[in-house]
Amino acid sequence: MNSSSIVTLDIGGTKINAGRYQNGIIEVNHIRNFSAHQNEELVLQFIMSCIDEVINETVHAIAIGVPCIVDIERGTVFNAVNISAWQEYNLKAALSEHYQCDIYINNDVNCFVAGEYAFGAGANYKDVVGICLGTGFGSGFVLNNQLHAGNNCSAGEVGGINYLEATIDDYCSGQFFINHYQSTGSELSKRAITGDKSALLAFEQFGQHLAKAISYILFVIDPQVIVIGGSVAKSYHLFIDALWKELESFPYQVVIKNLNIVPSQLDNAALFGAAHLYFQSKE
């Protein structure tokens, strides 16, 4: 199978990253803006157009990360917040009808943490948490060298936890900057670099809120390392000090002392992870 490859997709709420994985590398990938609030057929057609950009005669499987709960065995996706057509939709069946190859589907943050565990910052650890900060807050867990997806592939849906007057999603993702500062994280990052006090305060507050979300995870899971990715993680240097400062109030300081928190340095981590999880499913 050394000459064979697989198509890997990371489907987000606003973008789709499609690549082709072979022998430990992503040979090619394309990122396209995604109009997620369309009907089932239009969403499917767009996903297939992304696949068609990277598929070739060497491909024997398609592995996909999706932003929702998944029945991994059946390939049915449920309750996608940002893809309204996917409340209960058998994506595997729809794709299998068109592509004559294996189709594997898992949660996108599960794919991210699997990629970091197998190829990235989590490679030397057995207990890894991956956090994606983008349209929402997502987390995934590798425990004792195995992905922990839960009974319904919903482990890690921390973004839905009630927090202050809203949820973790509202305070620990790009939504925080839009809702509280009427600006995007990337725009505020540019201002913060120039010393803008309001922008610097925004990231300080974001770090404090993110520390609270991480505290919830630490109470349940005692990982060796947390890898932070997603679009907001590009501003990691602007919020990490405030995050660590807030964690000084965590009641079990030995946990904090032995904890590593690092930004993702692996391009296309979710694509690597989708491939890794597909191959694991075949063992």
Image (cartoon, rainbow, N blue to C red):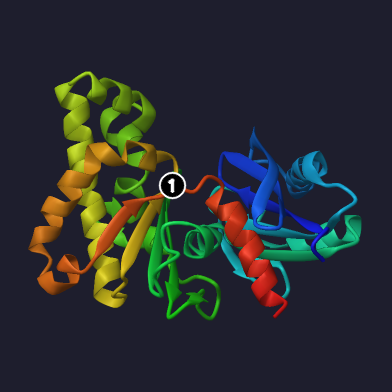
Q: Which residue corresponds to the image point at 32% horizontal and 53% vertical from the top-left?
A: 262
Q: Which residue is mark 1?
A: 265
Q: Position of residue 144 (x, y in %)?
A: 43, 81
In the rendered picture of this protein, how many numbered marks are placed on residues? 1
Whether residue 267 is visible to the viewer of this picture, yes or no, is: yes
Q: Which residue corresponds to the image point at 63% horizontal and 60% vertical from the top-left?
A: 274
**Position of 174 relative to 24 (above/below):** above
The quarter holding residue 138 reads: bottom left
Q: Which residue corresponds to the image point at 52% horizontal and 64% vertical from the top-left?
A: 118
Q: Position of residue 12 (x, y in %)?
A: 57, 47
Whether residue 164 is visible to the viewer of this picture, yes or no, is: no
The quarter holding residue 239 reads: top left
Residue 275 shown left or right of residue 231 in the figure: right
Please name whichever residue, 90 or 104, is drawn nearer the observer in this view of the structure: 104
Q: Position of residue 148 (x, y in %)?
A: 48, 76
The quarter holding residue 107 reads: bottom right
The crowding category of the residue bearing disc 1, from other C-alpha atoms within 10 Å (few below 14, some 14 to 19, many at least 20), is few
Quadrant of the frame with the C terminus? bottom right
Q: What amino acid does circle 1 point to?
A: Gln
